[in-house]
Amino acid sequence: MSSKPVDFPAKLVYQPTQNFIEQVASKAPAPGGGSAAALSGAVGAALLSMVCTLTIGKKGYAEVEDELQEVRARTEAARARLSGLIDEDTAAFNRFRVARKLPARNDAEKKAKDEEIAAATTMTIEVPLTTMQMCLEALHEVPTVAQKGNVNCVSDAGVGACQLFTGLEGGAYNVLINLDGLEDPAKVQALREKVRAARKEGRALFEQATKIVTEKLDGSHTNPA
Amino acid sequence: MSSKPVDFPAKLVYQPTQNFIEQVASKAPAPGGGSAAALSGAVGAALLSMVCTLTIGKKGYAEVEDELQEVRARTEAARARLSGLIDEDTAAFNRFRVARKLPARNDAEKKAKDEEIAAATTMTIEVPLTTMQMCLEALHEVPTVAQKGNVNCVSDAGVGACQLFTGLEGGAYNVLINLDGLEDPAKVQALREKVRAARKEGRALFEQATKIVTEKLDGSHTNPA
């Protein structure tokens, strides 16, 4: 008899995309916005990588080749990390849900339960915080990719910017909603500030990218925003 | 011997999410931003559906139950349509790529090739136009869902808004980049106007949703934008 642990449920990213969408739509609270934000971030980083790849080695782009090689190394690292965060976010949520149902029939159990809830709460904050930060880092690459990448892929750079912005905003929303579980008001305040600063920085990069892409695509050079 | 047609490549949505991300990142130009935009739209609609489901029948939400039932019927229809558009966008791109490689050794072949290129071009415009329009429709539901839905899911409503905004913007970018293939300048101008109007309307709804969600989540009620 094998004692191999059963890996169930399988990782979200190994399941068909259709299942992911259906599970989000279902009454199960996870996967929800946190995993969706990480997915957006991963797809956004993937789009930037693709634009770099479709630029490097192409005629007329020799000058930017080295720079885009370096950008791609960073967007590929971001893509790998963000892909992992899709499952980590749902795992954090499920850990918290299980922790809240632990027995607390005596002092020892009560202490263990409190500790597990605190650890799970920290995880539900740190995972989307990482999603947010990875997306912010990748957003810094967008103006370069949109400006210098293969002009035939400028729409892909634009969609990448939107996806990363969604990952940043979505991560931020998930950090904020889970701050309720923290007791230390100074820590809560510091995290709120961190989120606010990241959103402000990310918004500026996103608007810059939107402007570049829209001007390249729209004959009239009018920003619709 | 079976003569059953081989369904290859399999639909993108039936493949693992990890594969989708990897295919986006790869040197293959499709799936690219168009399919990614449709995916965002589908996930965004799914998130709104989830928030409705986690509100309907819950204590304290009896007043909004009927309204959210109706919203959910619409977001579920949008989700189904947008899920299909993930594959339709890549199919349109591939059709165009194949059309451009058709032989044109004589007048008959040249005519057939021109017609196929024209039909494929129309498809590469109409598919992201539909993505854009479905996302815009679903964005109209976001203020209601964010304002009246279960407050414990307000972050999911916020991520849904971002995803739909990405689907709208991403669809728009893909319409615009494919307009180059059209010859009728009046048609191009009309489509540019359509895209501009949709983006303006969608942006206003997105900013409204961002404000509602941020105020509900951020103790200081300061919009970071």
Image (cartoon, coloured by chain):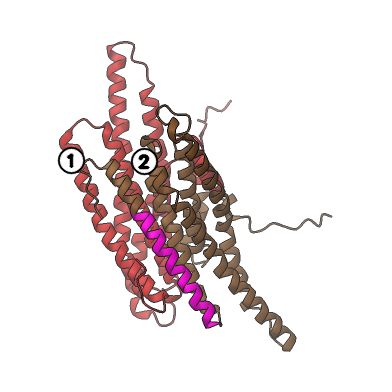
Chain colours: A brown, B red
**Nearer to us in this view, A103 or A176:** A176
**Chain of the residue under the numbered disc 2 shown in the image:** A
Is residue A145 shown to the viewer in this render? yes
**Nearer to us in this view, A154 or A83:** A154
Residue type of the residue flagged with mark 1: Gln
The residue at which mark 1 appears reads as: B189
Circles 1, 2 touching at the beta carbon (< 8 Å): no
Query: Of tags 1 and 2, which is closer to the observer?
Result: 2
Circle on res. B93:
none
Residue type of the residue flagged with mark 2: Val
Which residue lies at the image location 65% right of the left edge and 81% below the top edge? Answer: A114
Q: Is mark 2 on a helix, strand or loop?
A: helix
Query: Residue A120 location, x and y as percent?
Result: 62, 72
Query: Residue B81 location, x and y as percent?
Result: 37, 50
Q: How crowded is mark 2: few (under 14 residues within 10 Å), some or many (20 or more)?
A: many
**Chain of the residue under the numbered disc 1 shown in the image:** B
Please give the range of residues in magenta.
A184-207
In the displayed structure, B68 sits above or below B99; it is below
Q: Residues within 10 Å of mark 1 (few under 14, many from 20)?
A: some
Q: What element carries label 1?
A: helix
In the displayed structure, B220 sits above or below B19; it is below
Most common SS among magenta residues: helix
In the rendered image, the residue lying farthest to the right is A1
**Nearer to us in this view, A184 or B178:** A184
The residue at which mark 2 appears reads as: A154
* Quarter the N terminus of chain B occupies: top right
Query: Residue A157 location, x and y as percent?
Result: 40, 44
